[in-house]
C-alpha cells in the first residue's frame, strides 16, 4: 500500500502532530479523562498532592519576609486537565496551612487549561464550588503555545506582571510531555537536527478524525545543524554542551517548555517555585543510547521529557535545581527555584528532602504496584494502613474493595468505626469526573455490611462545606 506524505522534514516542534493533539483535547475536553483515554493517575493522586503541598509550604517559609500580604500569593497549575491533582492539593495544602504560622498569608490556587469547555466543567463542579466561595480557588485559560497573562474567571482580574509581583508557585504535571519540543541527533561528534516526516495510509483532509493515529507512520532524518539554532543563547549553550560531551544518541529538547518558563520569569519579579513530574530523563547517563523519539499514544500523545536540559537551563539562570540523585524508575519528580530566594531556599530544600528524597511519589507508585497484586493476602488492619498511607486514595480503595469487603464480613464490629472513618475520608477526598458511581456504590456496599448509612457521610460533607464557606 502506498503511503501519503502529510509533511516532510519538519522540526518536531513544528509538526502537524501538535495540531492533531490540540484538536483532540478541544474535541474531548474533560471526556479525555472521564473515558480514561488519557492516563493520569500516577501524577494526580493524593500522595503526589501531599508531597507538593509540603514543598510549597517550605517555599512560603523561605519567602515570607518578601511578601506583600496585601496581594494574594498564587499557586498556579498549568494544564490542570482532570482537576484531580488540584482537588487533592486543596485538601492536603489547606489542612496544613491553616494550622501553621503561615495562615495569615492570602493564598489563591488557580487551575488552568487551554480548553474552554474544561474550565466550564470545573466551574460547575459541586466539589470545587466551596473552595471558590471561600476565595481560595479561581480558574483561567492558559495556552503554553501562545502564553498570555491569566484572566481570572471569578476575580475578574488579569494577572499582568505589575499585578503579580509576589513570588509564586507553578505546578506542571504531565505538562512538558504534551507541548512542542524538538529532536536532535549526535552522529560522530556532529550535532544534527532530527527532522520528522509524517506519513499516513491515506490522505488526511480532517485532522480532527480521532482514528488518525492508527494510520500514521513517523520517520526521522538527521541533518547537520546550522548554528546558532535558536534565538536564545541559553538554549544554544545547552546544545553545545551535548555536542561536546555526549556520544552518538538521540535527544529531545524541551524548547516549548523552556519558552513557557521564560514567559513566567516575567512575573513575580522573576521569583517562583516550579514543581513538576513526568515521564522522562533527569540524569545525563539516561540520555545516552536513545533512539528516535516516538510518541506514546493514548488518544492524544506524549513524549519523554528531557529534564536534564531543564536542569541546565535553570542553572544558567542561577536558579536552584532539586531532584533525587537516584534513578526514578516510574516518574521523574523535580523542583526548581528561579529568581532570588531568601535563605537560599533552605526550607524548600528541607521540604523536598522530606517529601521526595525520603520516599516520594515514584517510590510510592513502585510500592503500590507490588502491593496491589497481594490485596487478597492482607489483613483488615493492613488494608486500612495502606489506605491511610495512600492518603485515602479512591483508586486504591476500588482496587482493594473485594479484599476489604471479605475482611469486613469476618471482622469483629470493634473495627467498624475505623472502617467508617476510612470510608468518610475516601469519599471526601474523591473528585468524581462524571456519572460513574463505582466509588459511591462500593462505599454504600461496605456501609450496608456494617449497618451504617451513607447519608451520614453526605450530611457530614455538607456540614464541612458550610463551615468552609
Image (spheres, grey):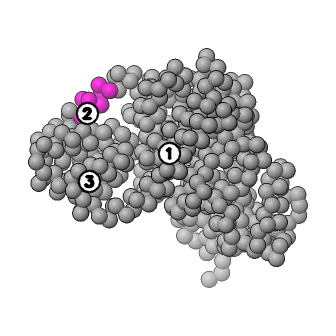
Q: Are marks 1 and 2 in contact (CB under 8 Å)?
A: no
Residue 320, given in percent of the width and then of the height, sits at: 69, 44
Where does label 2 land, which residue?
Answer: 458
Where does label 1 land, which residue?
Answer: 355
Residue at (26%, 53%) from the top-left corner?
382
The part of the chain drawn in magenta is 457-464
Q: Helix, strand, or loop for circle 1?
A: helix
Placement of 137 over or under 426, stated as above or below: above
- Would residue 17 be found to the left or right of residue 236 on screen? left
Mark toward the start of the polypeptide (2 vs 3): 3
C-alpha distance separating marks 1 and 2: 32 Å
Q: Helix, strand, or loop for circle 3?
A: helix
Residue 184, given in percent of the width and then of the height, sits at: 76, 66
Residue at (16%, 44%) from the top-left corner?
415
* Within-10-Å neighbours for mark 2: few <14, some 14–19, many 20+: some
Where does label 3 land, which residue?
Answer: 382
Mark toward the start of the polypeptide (1 vs 2): 1
Residue 55 - label: none
Mark 2 or 3: in front is: 3
C-alpha distance separating marks 3 and 1: 23 Å
- Would residue 371 be found to the left or right of residue 251 on screen? left
- Would residue 271 be found to the left or right of residue 153 on screen? right
Q: Helix, strand, or loop for circle 2?
A: helix
Q: Which residue lies most toward the bottom here?
A: 1
* Within-10-Å neighbours for mark 1: few <14, some 14–19, many 20+: many
Placement of 178 over or under 72, stated as above or below: below
Amino acid at each position: 500500500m502506498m503511503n501519503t506524505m502529510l509533511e516532510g522534514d519538519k522540526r518536531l516542534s513544528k509538526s502537524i502532530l501538535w495540531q492533531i493533539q490540540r484538536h483532540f483535547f478541544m474535541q474531548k475536553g474533560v471526556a479525555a479523562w472521564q473515558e480514561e483515554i488519557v492516563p493520569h493517575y500516577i501524577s494526580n493522586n493524593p500522595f503526589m498532592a501531599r508531597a507538593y503541598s509540603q514543598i510549597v509550604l517550605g517555599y512560603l517559609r523561605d519567602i515570607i519576609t518578601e511578601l506583600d500580604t496585601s496581594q494574594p500569593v498564587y499557586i498556579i497549575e498549568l494544564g490542570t486537565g482532570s482537576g484531580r491533582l488540584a482537588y487533592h492539593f486543596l485538601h492536603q495544602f489547606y489542612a496544613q496551612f491553616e494550622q501553621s504560622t503561615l495562615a495569615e498569608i492570602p493564598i489563591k490556587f488557580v487551575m488552568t487549561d487551554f480548553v474552554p469547555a474544561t474550565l466550564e466543567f470545573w466551574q460547575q463542579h459541586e466539589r470545587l464550588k466551596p473552595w471558590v466561595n471561600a476565595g481560595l480557588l479561581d480558574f483561567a485559560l492558559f495556552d503554553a503555545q501562545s502564553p498570555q497573562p491569566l484572566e481570572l474567571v471569578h476575580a475578574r482580574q488579569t494577572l499582568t506582571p505589575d499585578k503579580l509581583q509576589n513570588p509564586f508557585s507553578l505546578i506542571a504535571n504531565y505538562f512538558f510531555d504534551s507541548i512542542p519540543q524538538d529532536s536532535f541527533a549526535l552522529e560522530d561528534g556532529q550535532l544534527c537536527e532530527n527532522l520528522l516526516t509524517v506519513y499516513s495510509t491515506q490522505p488526511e483532509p480532517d485532522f480532527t478524525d480521532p482514528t488518525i493515529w492508527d494510520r500514521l507512520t513517523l520517520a526521522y532524518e538527521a541533518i547537520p545543524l546550522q548554528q546558532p539554532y535558536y534565538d536564545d543563547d541559553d538554549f544554544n549553550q545547552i546544545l553545545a554542551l551535548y555536542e561536546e560531551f555526549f556520544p552518538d544518541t538521540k535527544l529531545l529538547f524541551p524548547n516549548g517548555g523552556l519558552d513557557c518558563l521564560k514567559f513566567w520569569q516575567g512575573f513575580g519579579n522573576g521569583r517562583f517555585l516550579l514543581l513538576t513530574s513526568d515521564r522522562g530523563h533527569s540524569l545525563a547517563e539516561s540520555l545516552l543510547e536513545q533512539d528516535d523519539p516516538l510518541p506514546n499514544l493514548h488518544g492524544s500523545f506524549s513524549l519523554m521529557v528531557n529534564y536534564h536540559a531543564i536542569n541546565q537551563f535553570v542553572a544558567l539562570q542561577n536558579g536552584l535545581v532539586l531532584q533525587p540523585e537516584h534513578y526514578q524508575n516510574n516518574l521523574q519528580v523535580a523542583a526548581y527555584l528561579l529568581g532570588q530566594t531568601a535563605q537560599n531556599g533552605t526550607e524548600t530544600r528541607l521540604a523536598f528532602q522530606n517529601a521526595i528524597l525520603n520516599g516520594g511519589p515514584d517510590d510510592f507508585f513502585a510500592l503500590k504496584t507490588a502491593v496491589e497484586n497481594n490485596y487478597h493476602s492482607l489483613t483488615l488492619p493492613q488494608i486500612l494502613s495502606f489506605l491511610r498511607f495512600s492518603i485515602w486514595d479512591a483508586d486504591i480503595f476500588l482496587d482493594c474493595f473485594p479484599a476489604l469487603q471479605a475482611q469486613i464480613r469476618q471482622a469483629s464490629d470493634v473495627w467498624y468505626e475505623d472502617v467508617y472513618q476510612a470510608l468518610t475520608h475516601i469519599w471526601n477526598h474523591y473528585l468524581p469526573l462524571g456519572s460513574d458511581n463505582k466509588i459511591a456504590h462500593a462505599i454504600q456496599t461496605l456501609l450496608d455490611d456494617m449497618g451504617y448509612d451513607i447519608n451520614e457521610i453526605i450530611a457530614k460533607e455538607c456540614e464541612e462545606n458550610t463551615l468552609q464557606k
